[in-house]
Amino acid sequence: MSQAWCTIESDPGVFTELIEGIGVQGVQVEEIYDLSEETLNRLQPVHGLIFLFKWIKDDASDRNLLSGGAPGVFFAKQVVQNACATQAIISVLMNADGVKLGPELSRIKEFASALNPEMIGQVIGQDKVLRTVHNSFSRPEPFMVEPDEKATEDDDAFHFIGYVPVGNKLYELDGLQPGPIEIGEVKDGKWLQVAKPAIEKRIQKYSQKEIRFNLLAIVKNRQEVYRGMIEKLQATIAKGEGDDAKQKAEVADLEGKINQEKVKFQKWKEENVRRKHNFVPFIFNLLKELAQAGKLDEVVKEAQKQAESRMEAAAKAKAKAASKDK
């Protein structure tokens, strides 16, 4: 069996199921579209952030790179190709407060406590449970091709890193670096305010044309959060304290949010089933039936026509953008 790790899609539903698959309970992943205080407060408590970006060489010489490691910080070098998504998630989970790691990650953390970052990366890369769960999100392909060419500087390579507070410091955890990067000091637990400018600065390194970024937050399971809020409100109502009508309205609102979360999780589950399903036999038989019915040529010509239209539209948009930059 291949020991390779596949590339997986950056998606909150994928990462939430992946985290559950490796035995961690009580957390989920949410996509963040802006770094406003309102958005971040709405997702509290936030255990850490995962940032996906187009990779460019970065020696971190202008930042506080701790090659020798940092006290209390779990850091692993990425030694296996395509594992950066899962490794970034694991880095956040291993360092976050209040997360029940489950048996697999607890075992790894205990075993790796005396190892250097390179060896910890080896432990993660060779872990069968982690690799199996990660690879369960691989896209079914009609042909298995072993890549024999390394990426060049002209290729688009994307990378995941994590941001997580440990003690009173915020760290950037990038498996391609020799150690964690200290971002800054955290006061009163407000680490997101420290992370925001660091992420914005990283984005500013790219040209205005580069918009392929993805920011996700690993947060406490929202249903658990809302249930906890409901319990507090119900206890207050039972004591006859506060505005009874207002508190009951808040309970109803929270119950509605719980239902929304259930619907979202069901949608994620269905999407993940589709991601993992092999549609190749269906497509092959569909094309076969179209050919036998004498309709395949017609379908191909229509598809080619639509493809040409999209290419023309893309070329016009590119030319328009280029003219604005002059």
Image (cartoon, rainbow, N blue to C red):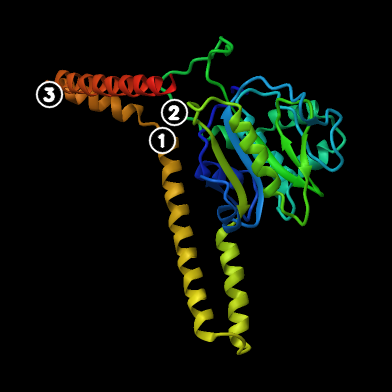
Q: Residue at x 59, y 22 (%)?
A: 2
Percent of width and height locating residue 305: 20, 20
Image height check: is 104 above or below 60? Answer: below
Q: Is residue 313 left or right of residue 271?
A: left
Image height check: is 292 above or below 109? Answer: above
Q: Quadrant of residue 291?
A: top left
Percent of width and height locating residue 204: 59, 31
Q: Quadrant of residue 239?
A: bottom right
The residue labelled by disc 2 is 140
Q: Residue at x 60, y 53 (%)?
A: 37
Three-letter amino acid code at disc 1?
His
The residue labelled by disc 3 is 293
Quadrant that contains the C terminus: top left
Looking at the image, which is closer to me, 110 or 178?
A: 178
Mark 3 or mark 1: name the one nearer the start of the chain: 1
Q: Is residue 236 left or right of residue 296?
A: right
Task: Assess whether mark 1 and mark 2 are in contact (beta carbons under 8 angstroms).
Answer: yes
Mark 3 or mark 2: name the one nearer the start of the chain: 2
Q: Is residue 129 visible?
A: no
Q: Is residue 111 visible?
A: yes
The residue labelled by disc 1 is 277
Image height check: is 239 above or below 125? Answer: below
Mark 2 or mark 1: name the one nearer the start of the chain: 2
Task: Assess whether mark 2 and mark 3 are in contact (beta carbons under 8 angstroms).
Answer: no
Give residue 244's mark.
Answer: none
Three-letter amino acid code at disc 3?
Ala
- Badge 1 element: loop
